[in-house]
Image (spheres, helix red, strand yellow):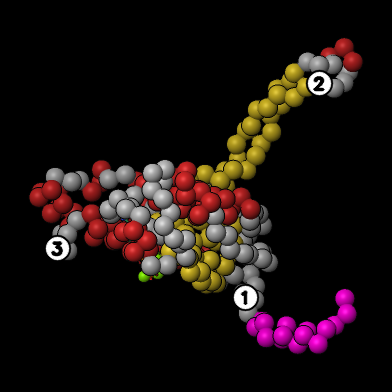
């Protein structure tokens, strides 16, 4: 392609490629969701419609970007972890597209905005600590929002409001972890050959990688021991 006189603007693009061999985390966070939640009558402190909508969008993102090995979401944010070898990422805003599936009677009053930031983590430990940090944030905010300002919130919740924090839904307390899992898919296929079998249907199994949501602890070793493939650098 011939160079135009406008070509010089390309030099304005900063060379800000992420440090190679590091985990790349992209965290999207709803802009001013305090207001957005209020305007759209989100249930306090947790609205399962809103959380499911976020997760649906994050699943869509993961299905489009196979380089994401794990994602973690809570409140109005989602973090996407890109493979160490990944060379690319982009943002997707499907929140508006899926709104109606989750908020049937609540019209979307204005488009939500999300800010995005990119952080690189050089080791498995720092990445695990990052995800633990976000899950701890989920826990702290929940305890705070479900209860009061006082010191022993869990105890006060129980003795005064008869709310056992541990009985609150896991999705609220733990947030949502999205990982890839292999599933066996059975489909029927029409037999083409040989001639005497023509037209007959046959069951065919194939394994597919799908994104599944979990509401488990990612703080601590158990999760990572159970899913060693996530941080496996050769995968
Ligand atoms: P920002 O991120 O600095 O633009 O401002 P905000 O307002 O988005 O603040 P942030 O991200 O620190 O906190 C998330 C807000 O979103 C918080 O005010 C509560 C609201 N929010 C998130 N999930 C829910 C929910 O399920 N129900 C309700 N009622 N509010 C929620
Ligand atoms: Mg924020
Ligand atoms: Mg926000
Ligand atoms: Mg904020
Ligand atoms: Mg937030």
Q: Residues within 10 Å of mark 1 (few under 14, many from 20)?
A: few
Residue matched to label 3: 150
Q: Earlier in the sequence, mark 1 or mark 3?
A: 1
Regarding mark 1 in the picture, which secondary structure is present there? loop
Q: Residue 73: image x %, image y %?
A: 44, 56
Please give the count of numbered marks on the rendered protein: 3
Q: Main secondary structure of the magenta part?
A: loop
* Quarter of the C terminus within the rendering: bottom right
Q: Residue 170: image x %, image y %?
A: 34, 46
Q: Is residue 148 left or right of residue 92?
A: left
Q: Is residue 50 magenta?
A: no
Which residue is more in the foreground, 97 or 71? 97
Q: Residue at x 13, y 54 (%)?
A: 156
- Circle nearer the viewer, 2 or 1: 2
- Mark 2–mark 1 Cα distance, whole angstroms, equals 51 Å
Regarding mark 3 in the picture, which secondary structure is present there? loop
Q: Residue at x 50, y 55 (%)?
A: 95
The magenta segment is 1-15
Residue matched to label 2: 191
Regarding mark 2 in the picture, which secondary structure is present there? loop
Which residue is more in the foreground, 227 or 42? 42
Q: Residue at x 75, y 87 (%)?
A: 8
Residue matched to label 1: 19
């Amino acid at each position: 392609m011939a160079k135009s006189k406008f070509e010089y603007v390309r030099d304005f693009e900063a060379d800000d490629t992420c440090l190679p061999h590091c985990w790349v985390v992209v965290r999207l966070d709803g802009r001013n969701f305090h207001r957005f939640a209020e305007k759209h009558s989100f249930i306090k402190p947790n609205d399962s419609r809103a959380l499911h909508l976020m997760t649906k969008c994050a699943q869509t993102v993961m299905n489009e970007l196979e380089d994401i090995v794990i994602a973690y979401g809570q409140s109005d944010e989602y973090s996407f972890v890109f493979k160490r070898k990944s060379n690319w990422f982009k943002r997707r805003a499907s929140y508006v597209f899926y709104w109606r599936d989750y908020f049937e009677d609540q019209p979307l009053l204005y488009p939500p905005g999300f800010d995005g930031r990119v952080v690189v983590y050089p080791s498995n430990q720092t990445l695990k600590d990052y995800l633990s940090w976000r899950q701890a944030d989920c826990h702290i905010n929940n305890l705070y929002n479900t209860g009061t300002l006082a010191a022993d919130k869990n105890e006060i919740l129980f003795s005064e409001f008869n709310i056992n924090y541990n009985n609150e839904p896991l999705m609220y307390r733990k947030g949502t972890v999205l990982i890839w899992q292999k599933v066996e898919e059975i489909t029927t296929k029409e037999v083409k050959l040989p001639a005497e079998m023509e037209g007959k249907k046959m069951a065919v199994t194939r394994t597919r990688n799908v994104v599944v949501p979990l509401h488990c602890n990612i703080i601590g070793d158990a999760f990572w021991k159970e899913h060693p493939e996530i941080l496996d650098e050769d995968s």
